[in-house]
Each structure stands twice: as structure tokens, then as C-alpha cells.
Amino acid sequence: MAQKIDIVHRFECSAQKLYELMSDNDFDSQVMADLGIEKETLSATQNDEGPLYVTRVSDKNSVPDAFKSMIGDQLEYEETRQWHKATLGNDWKIKTAFMTDKVNVGGVTEIVDVGDGCERRVRGTVEIKIPLVGKKIESKILEALNENFEKNRVFMENYIKGM
């Protein structure tokens, strides 16, 4: 059974402004660098929906010691992110470099106006179909996601304040 991703952060700007920042691949690269995550853009295209990015990500900080023998010293994955300018959000899907057929991670990000600011709502699932350790790995991935999104929030808040 998959674990749910449910992350909500509030920002002091309009949903449109946050969408413009977040859907900018160069800004996303700044955010990832601030998190200590290596990112390589494999493709960046524009379609009727909005920008479509495929990136390779290497995260050395999110692999618990207990799982390094199974997946290596860093978490590597390919992320496909389709932005939707009409609804101010994206669909995202992760394809891991390990046990691809046993790992399912993906979801949606919505950006909505709320009062005098906006909220970024990240929803999705983490499912690891490995007997005995799958749930434990899911929990660790979810914990790392929450930590990274919190750091991401702080970076973005500071950036928005400086605009």
C-alpha cells in the first residue's frame, strides 16, 4: 500500500507569480543547488499546456545509511514535470535508477490563491513494492521529501521577499 504525499506551504505572493517562478527551469536549478541536490536537464520543451521538463537528479543527502547497500550512496532518479499554465500547477513522475519496476512515485502540484497570498499543494504517492523493507523505504523517502520541501519553502520565501 502506497504512502500519501501531502505537503502544503503558504507564500506571500500571487499564485500566478509563484507559478512563474516554479515553472522556470533556471529558478528550479537555483532551488535544487540550494538544497545540495545535483540536477541535469535532459530536455526542456514547451507545449500547449506549458513547459515540460525531464531532469536527472542526484541527491546524496536523502539516502539513509541502512539503505545504501541496496540503492547506493545517492538517490538518483529521472523526473518528468509537465506544467499547466491554465491551472497553475504540474503533474510529476519519478523514475528511479534502481528497481524501476518496484518503485512508483508521482503526483500533482497545485498553486492556488489564498487570501493575500497563495498556497503550493503537493500531493502524490510513494510506493515501494519490495517485501519486508518497502514500507520502511517509503517512510524514509517521505521523510526526505518533507525535509527537502521545507528547505525549498525557506529558500523560496527569502527569494520572494527579495524581489
Image: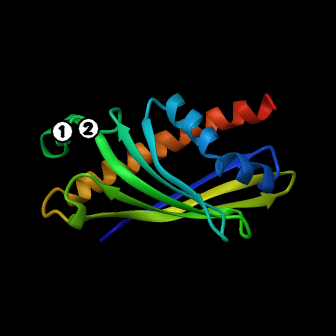
In the rendered view, would you say 38 is above or below 15? above
Residues under labels 1 and 2: Cα distance? 7 Å
| Crowding near the residue tagged with mark 2, few <14, some 14–19, many ≥20 C-alpha atoms within 10 Å | some
Answer whether residue 125 is visible to the viewer in this image.
no
Say what amino acid the circle numbered 2 marks. Answer: Pro
In the rendered view, would you say 76 is above or below 47? above
Which residue occupies 66% across, 54% down?
Answer: 120
Say what amino acid the circle numbered 1 marks. Answer: Lys
Give SS at disc 2: loop
The percent coordinates of residue 59 (x first, y second) are: 36, 37
Which residue occupies 71% across, 69% down?
Answer: 87
Residue 30, picture quadrant: top right
Nearer-the-camera pick, 116 or 103: 103
For the residues labelled 1 and 2, say whether their Cβ atoms are less than 8 Å apart.
yes
Which residue was labeled with disc 2? 64
Nearer-the-camera pick, 19 or 125: 19
The percent coordinates of residue 129 (x first, y second) are: 21, 66
- Res. 115 mark: none
- Res. 68 mark: 1
The percent coordinates of residue 10 (x first, y second) are: 71, 48
The percent coordinates of residue 72 (x first, y second) are: 19, 39
Give SS at disc 1: helix
